[in-house]
Amino acid sequence: MKTRNTGLRRTAIAVASSTMAVTVTGCGMIGIGGDGASASATKGDDIKVGLLLPEKENTRYEKFDYPIIRDQVQKLTDKKGDVVYLNAEQDAAKQLRQMRQMIDDKIDVILVDAVDSVSIAKGVREAKEAGIPVIAYDRLAQGPIDAYISFDNELVGQVQAKALIAALGTDSASKKIVMMNGSLTDPNAAEFKAGAKSELEGKVIISSAYDTKDWKPENARANMEKSIQDVGLNNIAGVYAANDGIAGAVIDAFKAAGVSKIPPVTGQDSELIAVQRIIKGDQYMSVYKSYPQEANAAAEMAVARVQGRSIEFDALTRDKVDSPTNKDIPSQLVPVVDLTKENIEKTVVQDGIYPVSKICTAPYKSLCNSLGIK
């Protein structure tokens, strides 16, 4: 998948605001001029937005994405709109059945975070034939999707890799690392990997690399245990871990092997337990992605699309991306920031992701105080 630069792609790391500059207002109105996304019909506020999420291993989906999208749709439709939510629990066939059920139920617009970007294309085509717009959420689904919203995924990998190189020091080129990538069925994982490798190659020695089936931590731990055996515990200077679930499994494997000091381990998603691991020093960093911005914008895109609001829709999708099946997909790429001990307050606390009381529980209280997290 190639991301096309339209002038809005971010080239610097920035903390995203949790609110969008463009909002959909006056949602009861019918179609504004311009063909934009070529909406074939317009709706009022009484709409149904289908939300298909991929799994529950990552806590973000249940705690952030779904409730934020639900509440934003309610806000944008004067509490007349509804979100129909289903989770595939990492089963691609189940997700395809869920999408087909939404098509049968005549849902007005579908947001889908695909378990498998290839297999979901069948459902996307069927939705298109039924006149139901489909917006790919967080992961780029194949097939004739109407739009795509996600974080700048190659930038995610670059941020992780740069942090790891910085942690390894000036002689990083002589040090061995392990790459623990995400699932092969997730197109985002390929972009994370590509972004990371663009920074790592030539600057470190990649001694071994693994793709983590279904993003499951137990699979990551098994791979890490094998890498420790093959490379040697004392020869691993750091680990590129694609997300926090994998990072936790890597850290557990190191501890089980009896390591005296855990080498730098990256992560992504800024899960609560990962933030606490960072405070403790077990995990070096994570990538903070503003779920409020992504989820709120996705809800705005869905409402604008189904209500035929081409001006608002176009303003929200000024980026363009290519998938293996479609070119120039209207998109929004949300920026990311590296999360370390130094900026916990300015990221997850400031954006209301976690209150300090949740982060700085008894085992972490003194560490939080030493870092000035209050």
Image (cartoon, grey):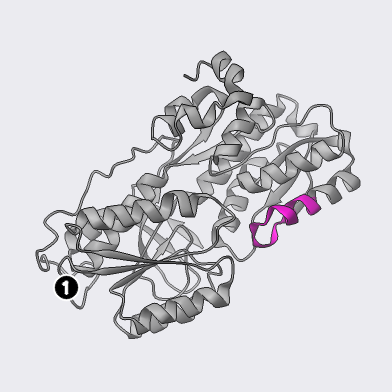
The answer to whether residue 205 is seen in the rendering is no
Q: Between 86 and 204, which is closer to the camera in this rendering?
A: 86
Q: Quadrant of residue 28?
A: bottom left
Q: Name the residue located 84 percent from the left edge and 40 percent from the top edge.
A: 256
Amino acid type, residue under disc 1 in the picture: Thr
Q: Quadrant of residue 40?
A: bottom left
* Magenta span contains residue 331: no
Q: Between 111 and 73, which is closer to the camera in this rendering?
A: 73
Which residue is labeled 1 in the image?
A: 42
Q: Position of residue 232 (x, y in %)?
A: 90, 40
Instruction: Work out whether 39 lies above or below 255.
Output: below
What secondary structure characterizes most of the magenta part?
A: helix
Q: Position of residue 82 (x, y in %)?
A: 28, 65
The answer to whether residue 40 is seen in the rendering is yes
Instruction: Work out whether 13 lies above or below 71.
Output: above
Q: Name the residue located 22 percent from the left edge and 53 percent from the top edge.
A: 75
* Magenta span contains residue 217: yes
Instruction: Work out whether 60 lies above or below 1.
Output: above
Q: Position of residue 240 (x, y in %)?
A: 68, 42
Task: Give the residues in magenta.
Answer: 210-223
Q: In this rendering, would 172 be left or right of 34?
A: right
Q: Position of residue 234 (x, y in %)?
A: 87, 33
